[in-house]
Image: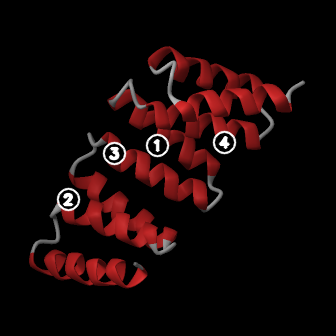
Amino acid sequence: MKNEYSEAIKSYQTALEIDPKNAPALYNLGNALYMVNKYEEAVVSYQRALQINDCSPECHFNLASAYNDLKDFKRALAHYQKAVELDEENVDAYVCMGNIYEQLKKFDAAKSLYAQARQIQPDNPKVIEAFEKLLEQTK
């Protein structure tokens, strides 16, 4: 599978040589780089895509995830928040922000985010699991 991502990376880079402002190619290049754990390079690709189209909740979410994996929680939170602003029903962004706040031992903030996610999708297994894990942690 890693080889498939390497091929995709080459293809997107070739496409970007032809059209350096191809936001979908930049976004997908970021995704492929992320999948092979090249988080710093993925960040650069997502940032370039957002310079062209700042209104993509998916791109903000993926950029946040790359920052999260780099342990840059401040930037991760900022882009998860932007993803939520652009798509208020982005339950995954709420859960990811909650996870970061848990790591930072800010349990009230995490609980609030999980509660918001539960309002949107009360039966979402990720939301239920995150909320229950937090309750266990804070007993």
Q: Nearer the viewer, residue 128 or 81?
A: 128
Kind of element beneath mark 2: helix
- Please state which of the two labelled residues, at mark 4 or mark 2, is closer to the viewer: 4
Query: Dot 2, crowdedness within 10 Å: few (<14), some or many (≥20)?
Result: many
Specify the amino acid type for callout 1.
Answer: His
Labels 1, 4: front one: 4
Instruction: Look at the image and tell me in which quarter the C terminus lies.
Output: top right
The residue furthest right is 139
Q: CA distance from mark 1 to mark 3?
A: 10 Å
Q: Quadrant of residue 18?
A: bottom left
Residue 114 - label: none
Query: Residue 28 occupies which quadrant of the picture?
Result: bottom left
CA–CA distance in space, label 4 to label 2: 28 Å
69 vs 93, left or right, is: right
In the image, what residue occupies the spot 33% across and 40% down? 57
The colouring scheme, among rainbow, by chain, secondary structure or one colour, is secondary structure
- Of mark 2 and mark 1, the one earlier in the sequence is 2
Dot 4 or dot 3: first in sequence order is: 3
Q: Earlier in the sequence, mark 1 or mark 4?
A: 1
Spatial CA span between label 2 and label 3: 12 Å
Q: Which mark is residue 58?
A: 3
x and y percentages locating residue 50 in the rendered image: 30, 52
Mark 3 is on which residue type?
A: Glu
Instruction: Report, in whole angstroms, how far the alpha carbon at label 4 lies from the one at label 3.
Output: 18 Å
Considering the numbered disc 1 on the image, is that residue within a helix, a strand or a loop? helix
The image shows a total of numbered marks equal to: 4
Q: Nearer the viewer, mark 1 or mark 3?
A: 3
Q: Which mark is residue 23?
A: 2
Residue picked out by circle 4? 100
Q: Are marks 2 and 3 in contact (CB under 8 Å)?
A: no
User: What residue does disc 1 label?
Assistant: 79
